[in-house]
Image (cartoon, rainbow, N blue to C red):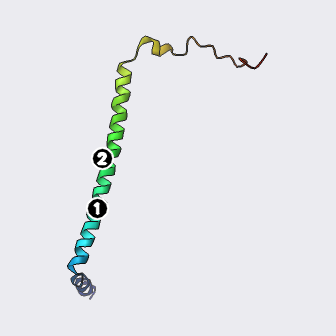
Amino acid sequence: MTTESETLAHAEETPAEVTRERSTLRVITWFSVGMAVAALGIYLGHELRSRYKFKRRTPYDFYANAGECQAGEFGVGI
């Protein structure tokens, strides 16, 4: 009995409702695909930039803070 009522319920839908439902699902699908592509692009861009920066480092990058004196009482007036 439930299969007959489901069949009748689907048969009662008008073609306008079907097209509206399809277009809504199509919009949601394209939006989610666009968001996935944007997220993938941001991730890949970050990875490529970090690898580029890592390959272009100099010996001074290893000792970036070697010349700076980090005194806690600097400018305190002691």
User: In this view of the protein, which residue sits in the foreground, 74 or 1?
Assistant: 74
The relative height of residue 1 versus residue 43 in the rendered view (above or below) is below
Q: Amino acid at mark 1?
A: Val
Residue that appears at 36% across and 40% down: 42
For the point 51% across and 16% down, which residue is it? Answer: 64
The answer to whether 19 is drawn above or below residue 70 in the figure is: below
Say which quarter of the image contains residue 50.
top left
**Mark pair 1, 2: CA separation:** 15 Å
Q: Residue at x 59, y 13 (%)?
A: 68
Q: What SS does tag 1 mark?
A: helix
58 w.r.t. 4: above or below = above
Amino acid type at circle 2 is Val
Q: Is residue 61 left or right of residue 21?
A: right
* Quadrant for the N terminus in the image: bottom left
Which quarter of the rendered picture does the C terminus lie within? top right
Relative to residue 68, is residue 73 drawn left or right?
Answer: right
Residue 44 or residue 24, whichever sits in front? 24
Pointer 2: what residue? Answer: 37
Q: Give the quarter of the image for residue 53.
A: top left
Residue matched to label 1: 27
